[in-house]
Amino acid sequence: MQKVTDNVYVESEISVCNTSIVVTKDGVVVIDTPMVPANAKKLAADIAGFGPVRYVINSEPHGDHIAGNCYFGGMVVTHDGTRKALLKAKPEDITGMLQMMAPDSLPLDKEFHFRPSDITFSERLTLYLGDHTFHLIHMPGHTPYSLAVYVPEERIVFTSDNINLGMPVFRDAIPDKWLETLKLLEELDVDKVVPGHGEVTDKSCFAKMARNVQGWLDAVGDAIAKGMSLEEAMEKVPQAEQFDDMPKEGPAAGFLRMNIERIYQILKK
């Protein structure tokens, strides 16, 4: 795990998304859990060296953030909508991704289940543990139920996939809310930003992410303005200059096409 501050550690090597921990004098808060069961178990064992887990916070409802909950102690805290997703989730929802990423993890062990939340909220919730304060703030964008975790004592915010400086994923996105959320994040008094994926960064990432999201909207919007059908847009938009470095083949190319389809449908409405 990468040590980010005296009390914050981030694991990105064995997690699909970033899994973070905040160590307080009264226990540990975990933010997002690894999807691969063996990795979740390993991380849970490593975290035990810092103290008991008091809370597990899921920052969004996608499988790479929630699937490892069952291997951790403490109380699970999510947005109301993420609890609904956890209650509906089935093991087969992640087996396809595991088949690509970690085929040795299949079949899933008998312990595996989608563990739902014990505590939920709709807009804001504050948790106090030891000398630390955890402000959970509903910040829709990447998903309708995404949240940020702001810990003022560490001058740090965990943003989920509302910050992902690689390829943003629009599968469940609300683009206009996403841009609003990025403005709200910029108002927080922080030095460190932990994105959903990628390296720990600083506040400069908010403006970069806004340009990235807006760039996707502009590219697809331009295709619509030119009268392109969805099929034509999915063929032409990847040729735009800002997508030169995007993979045109393989699984990542599937995300590119999925993004275009999702944005096209939203903008056409």
Image (cartoon, rainbow, N blue to C red):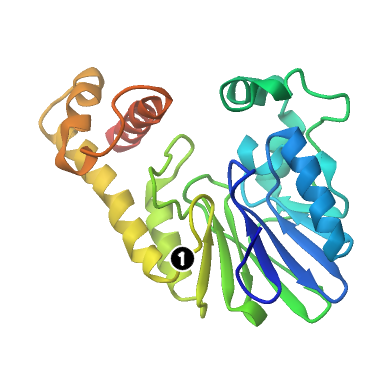
Find disc 1 in the rendering and name its residue. Answer: 201
Q: Looking at the image, is 50 positioned above or below residue 235?
A: below
**Location of residue 63 in the rendering, given as x and y in whole percent from the top left corner:** 64, 35
* Residue 250 image-quadrant placement: top left
Residue 118 seen in render: no
Q: Position of residue 164 (x, y in %)?
A: 44, 51
129 or 52, which lies in front? 52
Please tell me how crowded label 1 is: few (under 14), some (14-19), or many (20+) other residues with Cα within 10 Å.
Answer: some
In this rendering, the count of numbered labels is 1
Q: Please indicate, yes or no, whether residue 65 appears anywhere in the rendered image.
A: yes
- The residue at 20%/40% (across/down) is 219
Residue at image point 75% right, 77% down: 132
Judge whether 215 appears above or below 236 on screen. below
Q: Quick one: SS at disc 1? A: loop
* Residue 188 horizontal side relative to residue 114, left or right: left
217 horizontally vs 72: left or right: left
Q: As drawn, is 240 to the left or to the right of 99?
A: left
